Image (spheres, rainbow, N blue to C red):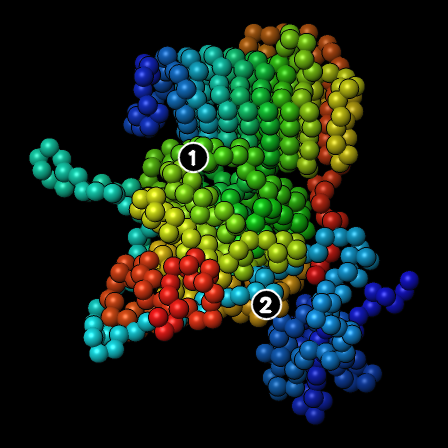
């Protein structure tokens, strides 16, 4: 059974306490900036109408969250499993240190999306951003897959400055030739081939199904894939003393 | 230019051949491969260049045939250019690398604990004999209410925010699984449980075998968020956000891929062989408001049932920083002084960054009192606490509890050779090599830690009793119980104490 909660004027501690008070699914109406919604939440479904506050789905542990609106900073911070679907855009540091699950965003993302994302065996986190991403995308990326589709229409570049700084694992896909984007020295950026695209195909299929997009026309464009040159980028810097 | 980079070894192996029975224990015990048996000459020979003076061979030689001495072949040193400084230049000229060291700051900087003296009762206010009288060493860490409140029926409201209960004001501070061995973690966890205190996972995650020690475990969340997930957060008695570490303030951590074997990989939840890089800052924390967000996200994720600790290194503006943390929703502030240990830190950072914990503690405690927010948080200090006397002095300066780590690894057999970063710890502590880790028996290790804390607890009681104090709570921030020796006016003012004789 789905419980509907009108969150207008509700404090985040009260809202989150209420959400922890039973196990079932919930629909939140008139959400306006309440933080930490779904923090650590296991397998439940949450749909949110309005704009959830910072740290939506932090440490998420299997829940499915749908946001019909924008979301603020730190979406899916240290997320372990589950899905966060955002029909609008999101703020900064989405998916910080995320280890598993999916964050699918129809719009754009702010600074530092996917920073320090990591993977472990079957836990492979995936972030797909429909529009563009801000600076420092995938900084320290240690695993998982980040895809930026560039479906935005404001004419700005698909990614801001300094993507992939400190990257030492995972893959980053940009739906662009990336000719005027400067990547750091310790990564390789090349045109994505059919094998690369096959790897993200199931995620793109999910993404397109969720947002009513046509996958074939999405794929009918050049993609660039970025991978790190080494899983041990800093090894040579030290001398024992 | 051959020859420039050769140094006569720092240590010499002295082997008394008339005692040596060629049992080859030294050869088998030395992971640095200093000792080698030469069958043609039927004798053991040494390559001193590899010796780190960890004393493993000395300790295990059955006939006491071995000793390690510091070499007297010295460079022509002077007060400005000592041997280490010269050798460091050579090392960097040869390699181009950043110097990497282990354990705490070895420089001869002031140890204020040794310049503080504790009071005792004479004639008036009689001392208390802990052998006969009850003495309370239990402490509760966490936010304390400002005032008593009563409900509508006039009953006292006793809802407290979550507290960490410790049988004595000492905990084992953060050392990750990865930087130290499985058996070292097992020893710490078991000893903490037996003693009713806590140990700390560090940021290496919590091994599946150690979840059962959860009530005596502090789980750490650092910038790399290794091994952090819902079950991990729920497992601990408290959650510690690591913002900084005394041995390396302002920089992150870096576990080399070579140390990320199958078990460490599983616990940290990263692929085998991959470097575990913790960035210098948490990249989502650039302000006290951001810190507040992480504190509250952890509280929300664990239903407000766990106290949250924020650990910072002692740096110049520590009092203002602590004031911010005390307003962030954190329940406990842990401050780590510049002599704190580490499994690996750049030498220059370890030796030159940060301030002494004694001064940091005194200024933080005073600042929080001045601002009327001292009860918002408990204060835990470390880096370095070496004895029960240091604990008593720290409590008198305002600490609620202390963190120890170097003393704890010494109890496990560490001989402070300060080469943890090599991963070849002959005592089975700072290594992941199975042939070395098995040398540390957790039955014995945990017992030695229990012995250490038991002895310290007894000594704390005796020092308290001598002062006529029967509860550690009555000692906290009681700076009248301290006097300084050989300290200048500024030092005395910061410490908030009088000089001996005053």
> Which element type, helix, strand or loop, lies under badge 1?
helix
Q: Are marks 1 and 2 in contact (CB under 8 Å)?
A: no
**In which quadrant of the rendered image does the C terminus of chain B lie?**
bottom left
Query: Residue drawn 77% across and 19% down?
Result: A180
Q: Which residue is located at x 55 percent, y 68 percent?
A: B414
**Residue A13 has which mark?**
none
Residue in the picture at 74% in, 67% down: B81
| Distance (Cα) linking label 1 and label 2 | 38 Å
Asked whether B22 or B158 is in front, the reply is B158
Picture coordinates of residue A166 (x, y %)? 68, 36
Label 2: chain? Answer: B
Which quarter of the picture shows residue A16?
A: top left
Residue located 31% across and 61% down the image: B478
The chain carrying label 1 is B
- Along the horizontal axis of the image, is B57 left or right of B121? right
Q: Is residue B480 above or below residue A175?
A: below
Q: Quadrant of residue B3?
A: bottom right
Write down the quadrant of residue A95 in the picture: top right
Are the numbered discs 1 and 2 placed on the same chain, yes or no?
yes
Identify the element where label 2 is drawn. loop
User: Which disc number belongs to residue B292?
Assistant: 1
Could you tell whether B93 is left or right of B244 in the image? right
> Which residue position is annotated with label 2?
B108
Q: Is residue B337 above or below residue A110?
A: below
Residue most extreme to the right: B1
Say if residue A100 shows up in the picture.
Answer: yes
Residue B357 image offset from top left, x and y in percent: 47, 57
| Disc number lying in front (1 or 2) | 2
View extreme (bottom): residue: B18
Q: Residues within 10 Å of mark 1 (few under 14, many from 20)?
A: some
Can the viewer see residue B312 in this picture?
no
């Amino acid at each position: 059974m789905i419980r509907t909660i009108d969150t207008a004027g509700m404090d985040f501690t009260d809202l989150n306490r209420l959400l922890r008070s039973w196990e079932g699914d919930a629909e939140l109406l008139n959400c306006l900036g309440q933080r930490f919604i779904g923090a650590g939440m296991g397998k439940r479904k949450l749909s949110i109408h309005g704009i959830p506050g910072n740290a939506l789905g932090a440490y998420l542990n299997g829940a499915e969250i749908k946001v019909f609106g924008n979301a603020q900073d730190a979406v899916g911070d240290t997320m372990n499993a589950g899905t966060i679907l955002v029909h609008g855009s999101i703020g900064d540091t989405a998916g910080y240190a995320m280890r598993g699950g999916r964050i699918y965003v129809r719009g754009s993302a702010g600074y530092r999306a996917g920073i320090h994302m990591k993977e472990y065996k079957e836990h492979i986190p995936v972030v797909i951003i429909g529009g563009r991403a801000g600076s420092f995308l995938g900084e320290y990326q240690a695993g998982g897959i980040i895809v930026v589709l560039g479906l935005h229409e404001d004419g700005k570049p698909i990614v801001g400055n300094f993507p992939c700084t400190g990257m030492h694992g995972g893959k980053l896909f940009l739906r662009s030739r990336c000719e005027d984007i400067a990547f750091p020295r310790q990564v390789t950026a090349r045109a994505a081939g059919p094998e690369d695209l096959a790897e993200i195909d199931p995620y793109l299929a999910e993404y397109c199904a969720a947002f009513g997009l046509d996958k074939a026309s999405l794929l009918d464009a050049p993609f660039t894939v970025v991978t790190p040159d080494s899983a041990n980028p800093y090894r040579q810097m030290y001398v024992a003393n | 230019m051959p020859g420039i980079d050769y140094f006569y070894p720092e240590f010499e192996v002295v082997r008394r051949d008339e005692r040596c029975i060629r049992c080859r224990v030294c050869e088998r015990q030395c992971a640095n491969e200093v000792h080698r048996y030469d069958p043609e000459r039927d004798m053991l020979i040494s390559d001193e260049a590899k010796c780190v003076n960890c004393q493993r061979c000395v300790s295990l030689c059955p006939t006491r045939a071995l000793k390690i001495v510091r070499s007297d072949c010295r460079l022509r040193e002077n007060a400005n250019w000592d041997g280490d400084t010269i050798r460091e230049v050579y090392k960097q000229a040869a390699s181009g690398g950043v110097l990497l060291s282990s354990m705490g700051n070895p420089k001869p900087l002031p140890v204020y604990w040794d310049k503080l003296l504790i009071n005792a009762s004479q004639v008036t206010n009689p001392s208390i004999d802990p052998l006969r009288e009850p003495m309370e060493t239990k402490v509760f860490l966490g936010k304390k209410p400002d005032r008593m409140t009563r409900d509508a029926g006039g009953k006292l409201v006793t809802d407290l925010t979550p507290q960490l209960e410790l049988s004595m004001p000492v905990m084992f501070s953060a050392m990750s699984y990865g930087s130290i061995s499985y058996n070292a973690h097992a020893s710490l966890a078991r000893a903490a449980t037996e003693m009713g205190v806590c140990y700390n996972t560090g940021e290496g995650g919590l091994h599946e075998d150690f979840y059962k020690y959860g009530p005596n475990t502090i789980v750490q969340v650092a910038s790399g968020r290794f091994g952090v997930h819902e079950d991990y957060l729920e497992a601990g008695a408290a959650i510690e956000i690591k913002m900084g570490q005394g041995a390396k303030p302002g920089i992150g951590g870096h576990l080399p891929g070579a140390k990320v074997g199958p078990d460490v990989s599983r616990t940290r939840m990263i692929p085998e062989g991959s470097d575990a890089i913790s960035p210098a800052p948490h990249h989502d924390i650039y302000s006290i408001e951001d810190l507040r967000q992480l504190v509250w996200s952890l509280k929300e994720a664990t239903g407000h049932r766990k106290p949250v600790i924020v650990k910072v290194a002692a740096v110049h503006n520590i009092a203002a920083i602590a004031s911010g943390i005390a307003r962030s929703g954190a329940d406990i502030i842990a401050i780590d002084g510049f002599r704190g240990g580490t499994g690996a830190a750049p030498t220059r950072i370890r030796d030159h960054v940060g301030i002494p914990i004694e001064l940091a503690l005194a200024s933080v405690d005073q600042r929080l009192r001045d601002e009327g927010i001292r009860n918002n948080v408990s204060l835990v200090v470390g880096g370095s606490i070496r004895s029960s006397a240091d604990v008593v002095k720290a409590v008198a300066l305002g600490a609620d509890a202390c963190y120890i780590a170097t003393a704890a690894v010494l109890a496990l057999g560490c001989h402070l050779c300060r080469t943890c970063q090599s991963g070849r710890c002959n005592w089975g502590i700072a290594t992941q090599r199975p042939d070395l880790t098995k040398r540390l028996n957790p039955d014995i290790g945990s017992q030695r830690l229990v012995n250490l804390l038991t002895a310290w607890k007894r000594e704390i009681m005796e020092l308290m009793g001598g002062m006529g104090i029967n509860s550690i709570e009555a000692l906290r921030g009681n700076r009248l119980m301290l006097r300084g020796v050989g300290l200048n006016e500024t030092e005395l003012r910061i410490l908030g104490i009088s000089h001996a004789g005053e």
